[in-house]
Image: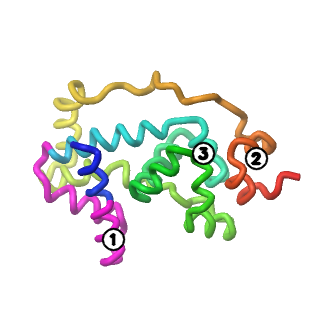
Amino acid sequence: MKTDRFWNIIESARSSAASSDVPFHEALVELLAGNPPQEVLEYAERFDEVHDALYRWDVWAAAYLIGGGCSDDSFMDFRAGVIALGQGWYERTALDPDNLAEHPTVIAAASAHRDEALFYEEVNYAAVGAFERLTGNPDAFYEAWARYQPVAHQDTDAEDMGGDFDFDDAREMHQRLPHLARLYLGTGD
């Protein structure tokens, strides 16, 4: 699946969710389930690629600030949440995760001391849900992925995450993510 098609699916699901008061992940599953299984697998492959591209220390630090901490599993959910924001915010985050300090959801969450902003676990499993709707079998995606994935998907664990740093060091966070740190940690004086 080409990148444009992937982002068109995300944007269509966002529009559908906004106009129908259906949660984004449900709109995404519904949209994906209207495609042939091969296209759902291609969506999953592209999702993994854009998801993995955010597997960096600076993005994890942003998730740590926004979430008041962030485990491995939570970081998966955070990256899915960034994808759910759409291509524009995804690209801004990939360029510099400190840009998230300008997102209305992040600003509202910081002022209300809510730590769930942008953590969206269900988005990780949209392709699984679509396959289940298509086949009636909850394991159908995993069976199809096992046949598809070895050819299509490369392991990204060895990717360079950038420079590691201490997320609990407020001074370091203010240097690396000044806008988010100001929102979540104060001025840093």
In percent of width and height, residue 32 lies at 21, 56
In the depicted structure, whether residue 161 falls above or below residue 43: above
Q: Residue type at mark 1? A: Ala
Ranked by sequence position, the earlier of labels 1 and 3 is 1
Q: Residue type at mark 2? A: His
User: Which numbered disc covers residue 70?
Assistant: 3
Task: Give the magenta-colored segment's residue range.
Answer: 11-38
Mark nearest the camera among 1 and 3 is: 1
Mark nearest the camera among 3 and 2 is: 2
* 17 and 11: which is toward the camera: 11
In percent of width and height, residue 80 lies at 43, 50
Label 3: state its secondary structure: loop
Residue positioned most to the bottom: 20
- Mark 2 neighbour class, 10 Å CA radius: few under 14, some 14 to 19, many 20 or more: some
Residue at horizontal 59 percent and vertical 35 percent from the top: 57
Task: Find disc 1 in the rendering and name its residue.
Answer: 17
Residue at horizontal 13 percent and vertical 46 percent from the top: 37
Label 2: state its secondary structure: helix
- Left or right: 155 with respect to 43? right
Q: Are the residues at dot 1 and dot 3 in contact (C-beta closer than 8 Å)? A: no
